[in-house]
Image (cartoon, coloured by chain):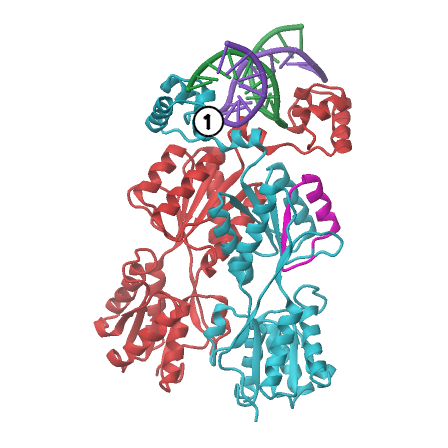
Chain colours: A cyan, B red, C purple, D green
Amino acid sequence: MNPTIKDVARKANVSIATVSRVLNNLPGYSDKTKQKVFQAIEEIGYQPNAIARGLINKRTHTIGVMFPSVSSAFSSDVLQGIEASAHDHNYSVVVCNTDSDGKRTMKYLQVLREKQIDGLIFSSEVLKKEYYAVLERMNIPVVLISSESRFVKVPYVKVDDYQAAFDAVEYLIRKGHRKIAMIGGTKNDTIAGIPRVEGYKKALEEHGLPFKPGYLAYGDFGFLSGCHAMETLLKTAPDCTALFAASDEMAIGAMTAAAKHGLKIPDDLSVMGYDDLRLAQMVVPPLTTISQPLCEIGKIACEKLIYMIDTQENVNSRIVTHSIIERQTVRILP
Amino acid sequence: MNPTIKDVARKANVSIATVSRVLNNLPGYSDKTKQKVFQAIEEIGYQPNAIARGLINKRTHTIGVMFPSVSSAFSSDVLQGIEASAHDHNYSVVVCNTDSDGKRTMKYLQVLREKQIDGLIFSSEVLKKEYYAVLERMNIPVVLISSESRFVKVPYVKVDDYQAAFDAVEYLIRKGHRKIAMIGGTKNDTIAGIPRVEGYKKALEEHGLPFKPGYLAYGDFGFLSGCHAMETLLKTAPDCTALFAASDEMAIGAMTAAAKHGLKIPDDLSVMGYDDLRLAQMVVPPLTTISQPLCEIGKIACEKLIYMIDTQENVNSRIVTHSIIERQTVRILP
DNA sequence: CTGAAAGCGCTTACAG
DNA sequence: CTGAAAGCGCTTACAG
């Protein structure tokens, strides 16, 4: 049995109320009692019971974090940031893997509610009405990562995918490319799929370049899908000089497929990715790509969440700046 | 204010004791009351408060997980497995990032204790005496991942690194290689450093091959260190035909460095990695490597932990089987 | 089958 | 400055 506040009270010869006061740094005791109490705590190795505390305070100092998949490079970097910030503020984080499954998500929302978490970070998925309904009943703050919700004003923090894709393609154009193909992510993905394709189209348009359907292929963000998409593009866009892929994995898949067909990168084909995974620096040649400050996104989201918990005030969303990491897969066209 | 058990008791016209009974599926009420209670629960949208429950039951259905870094490929895959298994058993998992820092670890141990977690999974680091001392006072079960502790009998689940390295090198030998170099991980790392080097030496020895110090270089498991180590080996082991690296990242770094010097892989140099990261399949040529079932390791560890929590019994350690993933970086020597 | 009451380990008015 | 007591939302003997 772990010692309780009663034990220290007895040991220090004071009431539990007094012990509680010194524990919580409240006013109302002499220096002498304070010493006595601390000594007693020391001697019996007392640690407060956060559960009992939580029952009264209605604060658990715990937040929930939901990812479609905790093991993705994206999630794990974001999680690292969240954890760091949470720890700084004395919060714990419980991780939930939704598998992008509605039932699982609802189940999780329920257990998080029962466990009385103080707030929730919801990442990389659309916040369905159904989810929001329970969040509302839980009456806890939520912040979204890489996602927005139109019908409610929940703050989000994310990169502007549309703009980032636009910038990537414009970068290619500035390097002299006119025939630029793209491999999009999952076709109807409203978060990382559609906006990036739109940014691509917009960049072409602004620079007076025609959009040709044959120049656009789709994958699912994964390596293999990048290989396949490249095979397609080799037929439908044989004359393109540059390629923008909506993920590093697809970009690398495309590079692999291109190499199989004897294309040299960047001499015969320039390639740009999106994500800046660790592996982007490891491939040959190293991949030029779009970088999102994932760890920082996690930190910012967590900070916003804790701010909302502490103040009960609302908070603004935040578009975080992406950047172009120049490496060696883009060639300057004369 | 969320509704409490009192509210449903009032609504259903029964005592809170009765509500509690139907909630917990205990015997002692008529079918009619059961219906009434469920109806009341439904109507007012009641959810039990796990904190109040935890205070009495001394069970929080929460486990802690400590990693040196949650964002590493290793940790995130293991975490995925842990989360999956925990969820299946109705446990939540709170993640802790120790940064391999003793103070941070102790701090975390303390908050986990205050939060009354039911058990702990401790990954990829040596369980110091200091840590174990608080764990003992917490009186909760612990299981280690990819780590063992000599002075206490805490169960672990891991791959046999010594054996895995041995197998890798033996594989190379079977393919006809006699001059095999190695890039070891962090030199004094007792978990993933030393054992792999020992396995390498043992395999050479068993096959009557001499161990030459010049054939062994050290890195820190990272990509860059692999590049550097390869540069060294090119001088100290210019005639080697095969290389075993203690991590995929180092293997790929070595491949990159070798390529810079005009070596073709696997024609001029065979390479074997360790980890089977996603990127192992993406490099050209795809890397032959040692695979650990990370997700499964996480699951097994979690299952063992929950078993210990439930039964209070001890549990055996588990060596999980690694495998050799044959891809295209090892050439058969005539 | 059902309820009143004690108690889990704390915090917080309230009274002195 | 200090303590007795109520209460947070539950569970669990105990009595009926």
Residue at left 40%, top 85%?
Answer: B264
**Is residue B6 found left or right of A60 in the rendered image?**
right
Number of numbered discs on residues:
1
Q: Horizontal and vertical percent for residue B19?
A: 69, 24
| Residue B212 seen by the camera | no
Q: Horizontal and vertical percent for residue A55?
A: 57, 30
Does residue A43 lie above or below B163 as drawn?
Answer: above
Amino acid type indicated by mark 1? Pro
Categorize mark 1 by other alpha carbons within 10 Å: few (<14), some (14-19), many (20+): few
Identify the image quadrant of residue A176.
bottom right
Residue at left 67%, top 87%?
Answer: A237
Mark 1, residue position: A27
**Is residue B257 found left or right of A254 in the rendered image?**
left
| Magenta extent | A127-148
* Local secondary structure at mark 1: loop
Which of the image's four quarters has the N terminus of chain A? top left
Is B188 one of the magenta-colored residues? Answer: no
Identify the image quadrant of residue A255.
bottom right
